[in-house]
Amino acid sequence: MSSSQSPRRDARRNHERLLVEAKQLFAERGVDAPLDELAARAGVGAGTVYRHFPNRDALVRELYDAAVTDLHDFAPQFLGAETGWLGIELWLELVSGWLADSPYLPAVMRRVAELDPKHRPATEFVPMMDAVVARAQAEGSLRRDVTAVDLSVMVDMLGSLGQYGKAYLPYWRRQLTVMLDGLRARPDVTPLPGEGQAFDEFHDMSHAKGPTPPNG
C-alpha cells in the first residue's frame, strides 16, 4: 500500500464517522449542537471536523442530500413490486421505518428549508409516487380517493414515532397495519372529506415541522 493511500483511507473513515456521530448528536440536541462535541464523539480534533465540513451548514446539507439518495434507492422497489398494493405496502413500510430510525432528519429538513427554500429534491419523486398510487387504484386494491400526498403524510406520521426512541421501534408496525387496512378499497369506505393537499404545500409543511401562525 502506498503512503498516499493510507491518509485517503483515514480521511474517508473520519468522514463517515463524523456523519454517523452527527446523526446521533443532532437527534439528541438539534442541528445547533456544538461541533466540538461532534469532534469528541468521533474521536477526532476540531480541525478535522472543519477540514471535512467548512461550516455547520455544509454538514447539514450533506446529511440532507444523503437522505434524498436513500429515497432514490427505495424507489425501484415500489415501482417493481409484483402488485400495485404491494408497492403501497413497501412504500409505507420501508420509508416509515427508515424515517423512524432517523430522528435527526426533521431538524436537518428544517435547517435546509431555512438555508435554501428553493432546494426541493423531493419533487423528483412526485411522478413515481403518482405512478404507484395509479397502479394500485387501477387494480382495485387502493381506495380511489387516496392521493400520493395522503400516503406521504402517513409516512410522516409513522416516521415521527422515532421521537420515542429505539424502545418503541418494535411496535410501530401496529400503526402501519391500521393505516394499511384503512387504505384498502372496499364498498363500504367512508368518503374522505375535502380535497387532498397539494404536494408543494405538503413539502413546505413537512420541512417546517412546527406550528404555522394563523393568517391575519
Image: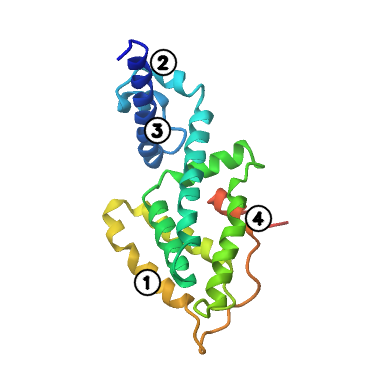
Q: Which residue position holds label 3? A: 19
Q: Quadrant of residue 49?
A: top left
Question: How far is disc 2 from disc 4 in space, using C-alphas?
Answer: 39 Å
SS at mark 1?
helix
Residue 141 visible? yes
Q: Which mark is residue 200?
A: 4
Q: How many marks?
A: 4
What amino acid is at disc 3? Answer: Leu
Question: How far is disc 1 from disc 3 in space, using C-alphas?
Answer: 33 Å
- Other-residue count near label 1 (Cα within 10 Å), few / some / many at <14 / 14–19 / ≥20: some
Q: Return the disc, 1 or 4, that comes first in the chain's sequence.
A: 1
- Other-residue count near label 2 (Cα within 10 Å), few / some / many at <14 / 14–19 / ≥20: few
Question: How far is disc 4 from disc 3 in space, using C-alphas?
Answer: 29 Å
Q: Which mark is residue 195?
A: none
Task: Give the left or right position of residue 122, taking residue 47 as reference.
Answer: right
SS at mark 3?
helix
- Colour mapping: rainbow
Q: Which mark is residue 47?
A: 2
What amino acid is at disc 1? Answer: Thr
Q: Quadrant of the C terminus?
A: bottom right
**Residue 199, image x, y percentages:** 63, 58
Q: Return the disc, 4 or 3, that comes first in the chain's sequence.
A: 3
Q: Return the disc, 3 or 2, that comes first in the chain's sequence.
A: 3
